[in-house]
Amino acid sequence: MRLSRMSMVTGCVLAITLFWFLYPAAAFTDEIQIQIDVAPNVLNIQSQGVIVSVHTDIAYSAVVGASVNLNGVSIQYWKADARGNFVAKFVMDEIKTLDGLKIDGYNELALFGYTTDGDTFIGRQEIRVIDIIPRGT
């Protein structure tokens, strides 16, 4: 069975219309850019640290906590700071073993997640990564 050109065009228009009906425009909005502050901002591969904290300027109540990741590393837990902003906590050993980390250089960390409205947000910060054995060990 051959479809005419008109039938194919009509089918495409119907498919696009159905797509936009099922997936509202809100799902296709641009990412919300947020400010982040990563602690520590110098990550020593040899440190005995346990947690990497990421402080944000987005309201705690606006974030789906379980959706948040840092360069693909899943969030360990989250909380609100004294201002009511979202704070994400990650296992430091998982951050230390990210593929492609530049030792003795700067590396961009990107915090990504979803808001309760279904929008995506992202914040980026460069941190320095070093590999120095701490004194006294």
Image (spheres, helix red, strand yellow):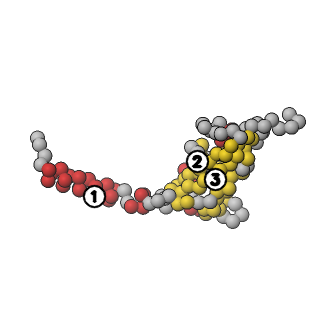
- Residue type of the residue flagged with mark 1: Thr
Amino acid on which disc 3 is placed:
Gln
- Residue at image point 57% right, 58% down: 63
Is residue 53 at least partly visible in the picture?
no
Q: Nearer the viewer, residue 78 or 128?
A: 128
Q: Quadrant of residue 19?
A: bottom left
Residue marked by disc 2 = 69
The answer to which of 65 and 51 lies nearer the viewer is 51
Residue type pointed to by label 2: Asn
Q: Is residue 54 left or right of residue 5?
A: right
Residue 100 place in picture, x, y as percent: 60, 37
Q: Is residue 46 left or right of residue 62?
A: right
| Location of mark 1 (residue) | 17
From the image, tell me which residue sits under label 3: 125
Secondary structure of residue under mark 2:
strand
Quarter location, residue 20: bottom left
Is there any visible trace of residue 136 in the rendered image? yes
CA separation in Å, label 2 and label 1:
33 Å
Q: Which residue is found at the position 61% from the left and 63% from the top?
A: 59
Which percent across, then down, holds residue 52?
A: 70, 47
103 relative to 30, above or below: above
Residue 49 appears at what percent x and percent y? Answer: 76, 42
Which quadrant holds the C terminus?
top right
Of circles 1 and 3, which is in front? 3
